[in-house]
Amino acid sequence: MITITESAQVYLAELLSKQDDALGVRVFINDPGTPRAETCIAYCRDGDTEDGDVEQDFGPLKAWFEQRSVPFLEDALVDYAEDRMGGQLTIKAPNAKMPRVDPDSPIEDRINYILYNEVNPSLAAHGGEVSLVEVTDEKYAILRFGGGCQGCSAVDVTLKDGVEKTLVEQLPELTGVRDATDHSDRSQAYY
């Protein structure tokens, strides 16, 4: 899954020793499988872990990996290198932005895959994009438009006849979509 080098383990263990309540570190990826993916390491305290997290012992420290992020952390490397300024912790996760979805993937990952590989290329022709904010308990995808779509007078048609139709056809468990965009800013609007 992920490699934490010995130098990174020593560095992280030293940081953890200065925290009274830290149990270890938690590794996760924000927006995994999308161009916006960002790999993160944070202190892990009581209550920070989630059901399904993968726990791993790295000698001087423990790490928890968010279950949803695990497939995207394959071949990831956490390293620490000393330099004249002290040192730098680096995280390289070459698969963080790669879409890795299958029918058993979380619905958020499947929605993002469709948005970034099917919907956004079409919207890009007008300088627009759409991203997932969240999926509600009622299985509505809450979306945010940007670029030429924000404030565009045709966004309702794009939302219902384009984005919603595409997502619901491919993900029948999805109830529908809702727009969370503030369309009062029309400065970049296509129409």
Image (tube, rainbow, N blue to C red):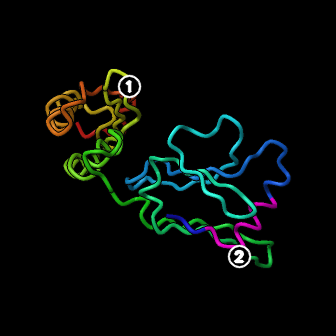
Question: Residue drawn at (80%, 78%), measured in percent from left and top?
Answer: 84
Query: Residue flagged by tag 2: what amino acid is it?
Result: Ala
Can the viewer see residue 161 in this picture?
yes
Question: Residue drawn at (68%, 45%), measured in percent from left and top?
Answer: 44
- Relative to 179, is 9 above or below? below
| Residue closest to the eye, 21 or 148 | 21
Residue 46 is left or right of residue 175, and the answer is: right
Query: Residue flagged by tag 1: what amino acid is it?
Result: Thr
Evaluate if marks 1 and 2 touch, with contact meaning CB atoms under 8 Å apart: no
Question: Residue drawn at (30%, 52%), measured in percent from left and top?
Answer: 101
Q: Quadrant of residue 77?
A: bottom right
Can the viewer see residue 146 in this picture?
no
| Residue closest to the eye, 90 or 187 | 90
Callout 2 secondary element: strand
Residue 180 is left or right of residue 83, and the answer is: left
Q: The magenta stretch spans which residues? A: 4-14
Residue position for label 1:
136
Distance from the alpha carbon under mark 1 to that under mark 2: 42 Å
Residue 79 is left or right of residue 182, and the answer is: right
Picture disc at residue 81: 2
Residue 143 % position (x, y) = 34, 33
- Relative to 112, is 99 above or below? below
| Residue closest to the eye, 150 or 178 | 178
User: Which quarter of the image is occupied by the C terminus?
Assistant: top left
